[in-house]
Amino acid sequence: MVFASKTAEVLTFHQVPVPHIVPKEGWFEQDPNVILQAVIETVDVTCDNLKKLNINYEDIVAVGITNQRETTILWDPTTGKPLYNALVWMDIRTSSTVDEILQNGKKPQSFLQNQCGLPVSTYFSALKIKWLMDNVDEVKEAIKESRCLFGNVDSWLVWNLTGGVRGGLHITDVTNASRTMLMNIETLKWDPQLCKVFDIPMRILPEIRSSSEIYGYIQRVTKLMGVPISGILGDQQAALVGQMCFKMGQAKSTYGTGCFILYNTGAYTVRSTHGLLTTVAYQFGANSKPVYALEGSVAIAGISIKWLKDNLQIINDVKESSELAMTAEESGEVYFVPAFSGLYAPYWRKDARRLTPII
């Protein structure tokens, strides 16, 4: 999306869908190279759109990145190749890893929450990294040989766009780092104790930067060669900023693949006793103080409508779901709980699943 800096008018946009790979029930992957190529295609088509509007795309002065949070990518910096597919945020293959970390229930889910703001859950990146380290031979070998880098989607894109194997920047911002379970929510630094809990070597982690500064310049062959990358925000934090929730007490709620409410808590790291997450909302500049938020996360929302269409095949178009709902006078005490990836806030129940197969 390209917008005018003085008026905030959206000038043009383009999007390319990135398909999910579902090797098993509850496993959600994406090809990191497909993600990268989708971004490059999107940039180039958007620039062409500007040209059709008689706007010079060379007038673009900065690029910002917003991305899926928690989605985990490991890659080899010597070849630039991913060591495995990206594990998407709603992937639940790490259920056994959660049990291992919690010592099969001997530790509470909240035992790390004072340090990182998050409960131990399949949702967060540290569990995904550990699963990859424990189960993928290529990852084990790469870590042993010190040729493995970790990043969420923001890190993967920045590294590639700023040079890749030829000196690409290995960085992330505080909002994405706050979703890994590895960053101390107070110091905004990688926490050695947290990394030790998951046996994750700190050398694979990206440098943590603020959400708004010039990190580097695009070197990849796109129409935006030489343009600075000057902002990074996780998608839900970007929505908070986009809704201009800059004052403490302001909140936004987003209904998409999942549902997410973020509530600005200002300079305070508020710890919820009712299942909400403590997260970084944004940090506008390296010398600025961070702003925090409370978050309520629901894993499955809009994607359940797609499931009704593609899997149950009871509707032909997503619009039909609301039309059918309007025809029902009552539910007959039948409730649909979309716990395809367990339940997130406030329950954090990875075991909340259907009991029998749906035919």
Image (cartoon, helix red, strand yellow):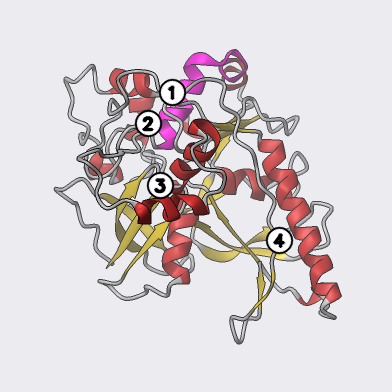
Instruction: Tell me the CA gap for discs 2 and 3.
Output: 18 Å
Percent from the top left, x then y, of residue 320?
Answer: 49, 51
**According to the image, label 2 marks what residue?**
122
Residue 15 shows in the view: yes
The span picked out in magenta is 124-140
Question: CB of mark 1 within 8 Å of CB of mark 3?
Answer: no
Q: Residue furthest left?
A: 273
Q: Residue at x 25, y 71 (%)?
A: 249
Q: Earlier in the sequence, mark 1 or mark 3?
A: 1
Percent from the top left, x then y, of residue 74?
Answer: 59, 31
* Residue nearest the viewer, comparing 43 with 173: 43
Vertical order, 350 against 293 (above or below): above
Vertical order, 357 against 152 (above or below): above
For disc 4, the neighbor class at 10 Å (few under 14, some 14 to 19, many from 20) is some
**According to the image, label 4 marks what residue?**
14
Q: Earlier in the sequence, mark 2 or mark 4?
A: 4
Q: Which mark is residue 93?
A: 1
Which of discs 3 and 4 lies nearer the camera? The answer is 3
Which of discs 1 and 4 lies nearer the camera? The answer is 4
For disc 3, the neighbor class at 10 Å (few under 14, some 14 to 19, many from 20) is some
Q: Amino acid at mark 2?
A: Thr
Q: Amino acid at mark 1?
A: Arg
**According to the image, label 3 marks what residue?**
301
Instruction: Tell me the CA gap for discs 1 and 3.
Output: 20 Å
Q: Quadrant of residue 269?
A: bottom left
Question: CB of mark 3 within 8 Å of CB of mark 4?
Answer: no
Q: Earlier in the sequence, mark 3 or mark 4?
A: 4
